[in-house]
Structures are given as C-alpha cells and as structure tokens.
Image (tube, rainbow, N blue to C red):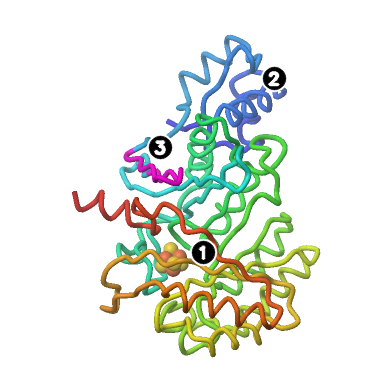
Amino acid sequence: MKALSDYSLEGFQQQIVAWGFKVSHAKPLLRNYYAGAGTVDWPESRTPRGLRDRVQAECGMMASALAARQVAGDGTVKLLLKLADGRTIESVVMPAYQEDRMAGCLSSQVGCALACDFCATAQNGFARNLSAGEMVEQFLHLRGEAKAIGRRLQTVVFMGMGEPLLNLENVLEAVRRMAGGDMGALGWRQVTVSTVGIVPGIDALAAAELNINLAVSLHAPDDATRAKLVPSGRRFGVGEIMAAADRFQAKNNGRPVSIQYCLLQGVNDSPEQARQLAALLAGRRMHVNLLHYNPTGVSLTGRTYEPSPPEAAETFMRELRARRVVAHFRRPRGRDIDAACGQLRRRAASE
Ligand code: SF4
C-alpha cells in the first residue's frame, strides 16, 4: 500500500483524477497532511467524503513506524524509525537557539558505503537508498515531535545516516516536497545538504537551483590526513572539493557554504592544521563549524578516536579567528543518549 508521503503533488493529482475526483482537491489534502505532521484533519481539509473513503482505503498515512525514541537532558530527541521493509534509520530533532524552534537532522540512506573511519553509521555498511517518501516521513515525524512540545521545526539538514549526494534524485524530490509552498512549506533556505565532498554531486546540486544551503564535511585541511579519515578523500582532493564549493556558492547568490570540522585528538586538531585550514579559507566567504566528537568505539581500521581536549579545541578556534575565519563551536547535543549518528541503530541491532 502506498503512503501519502510517497506522492508528489503532480503524482497525487494524477491519482485522484484517475479515481474520478477533481484535481483541485489534491493540494489542500496534501497541505493538511504535511501541516498535521503525517495526519489529515479531514473536515479542515474539506476533502469530499468519497475521496476521503478512497484515500483511507488505498493509502496509508505513514509507511514508517517509531521503533525507539531517546530523549536527552538538553531536549534532543533521537528517533529510530522502522521502514516498510523492516530496516531502520535514525532521525534527530534538537532545540534551536530560539525558544520556539527546533532543528532536524535527516538520513538519506540506510547505512552508508563511504566508510569514514570515525563514523558509527559506516560500521554497519550500506543497505540501500531511501526513497523521497521515506525522507519526507522523517521530516513529518520530527515536525510532530516539535509540535508536541509547542515548538516549530524550523530547519532540516541532511546530515544523518548516508551521503545525500549519492542519492541525489530522491533527496531533491524530498526537498521539493518539504520546502516548496505547495506542501511542506518549510522554505528552501531552511534546508541544508551536507556532504563529505562528492564533487559531481555538489555540481549537480548547484545545477538543481533550489536555493538551499550546502555544508561540506572537511575534517582535515590536507589530502593525506583527510584520506585516512574519509576514504572518499582519495578520489576527491581538498582543492577539488573547495573549487566545487566555490562553484556552488557562485550559483547560490554567494550564500556562504559551511565547513564542518570534527575535532579529533591528535589527528586533526593541531595549531598548524588550524593555520592550514585558515589558509585554505582565505579569500573565501565560508564559515567553519567545529564539531565535538562523540566517541563510537573501535573504528573500521581498528583505531579509537577521542574528542579534542577543550584547550586544544580553544587554541584551534583562536588560530582560525586570528586569521579572520568565521568559526564557531557547534553545541554538543544529546551527550547522555546515543548521540553519534548510527549509534542507536547499532545498539538496537545488537539487543
Ligand atoms: S560520516 Fe557520513 S559519509 Fe561518512 S560514513 Fe558516516 S554517514 Fe557516511
């Protein structure tokens, strides 16, 4: 059975016309479904009785179900969602700086094939791409979580399980449904796609001209260090990735690209590496988010990574700022739950 999340507006219009109903009923119904975080208020949607019966007979509301839920002391909520084929994915919603808002983090694949050495998701390998509907459902689950505590889901970032640019077609379709005014109405600028640096994907994302944000997970300023952490770095060098980010930025009205940098003790957190990063960013209007590492145990290559000590992280930040790089620490979230992406799924699988 198809779920309402599986439909684009055009697809749903065609479907209800095929059922013998007016095309004009499609948009209010889907808007109501998105506003209701995956449920329909039938009277409010003004759906004719016959169409309502048909939709209820032929469509599910959601294909995914909540398999586990963790709530951290800081208000971060991590969901483990079970998909129709029994596989599981993680989605997270975090309180934003403004008291009435939340920020969501979505997965784009079941697992991931890129084998980044410090990543919990990588340790279970890759299963499959998510459909647009499965990504939309994460958004709706998170929108419901925010609504339940009187907040609004204000932004989403594709930074959960998977590399979104290796599932670009479905990611773009999900973004169109979530952000476009016809259905989810989140707003294009409220969406960020985060990549480890898949150069053709960055160019394809730019070509889509959706006016969304790009984040690049760099994690090292040089190819040698990066290739040890992010194996895809052997295919796309730092210079090539930054050039693609420049092209994206130029196409996106100069809107700054954010550079994600996870500080790992003794690996990428030296003052010299901060200076190299600053040199790389000189003349570029990009900002750096310094991420706290949530340890995930022994890595794929048998290493155990640790977060940078606070003094080293502060020094790294100072070196950047001294060279006029805009840099911030991203507030660590959900440290009392399985905060790293992929950890809850691994725990659930081992229980
Ligand atoms: S960090 Fe991202 S791209 Fe790398 S293995 Fe993990 S999920 Fe995949």
Q: Is 73 part of what is drawn in magenta? A: yes
Q: Quadrant of the N terminus?
A: top left
Ligand 1 positioned in quadrant: bottom left
Q: Nearer the viewer, residue 282 or 100?
A: 100
Callout 3, which amino acid?
Ser
Give how far across and how far down residue 136 sits, in percent.
53, 42
Q: Earlier in the sequence, mark 3 or mark 2?
A: 2
* Residue 64: image tag: 3
- The residue lying at 78 percent from left, 70 percent from top is 250
Give how far across and how far down residue 270 sits, in percent.
49, 86
Q: Earlier in the sequence, mark 2 or mark 1?
A: 2
Q: Nearer the viewer, residue 238 or 207?
A: 238
Asked if the residue under mark 3 is in contact with the one under mark 1, i.e. CB atoms within 8 Å, the reply is no
Camera-near label (2 vs 1) is: 1
Q: Write down the residue under mark 1.
A: 166
Give how far across and how far down residue 277 sits, in percent.
60, 83
Real-space Cα separation, disc 2 to disc 1, in angstroms:
37 Å
Q: Nearer the viewer, residue 103 or 127?
A: 103
Q: Write down the residue under mark 2.
A: 22
Q: Earlier in the sequence, mark 1 or mark 3?
A: 3
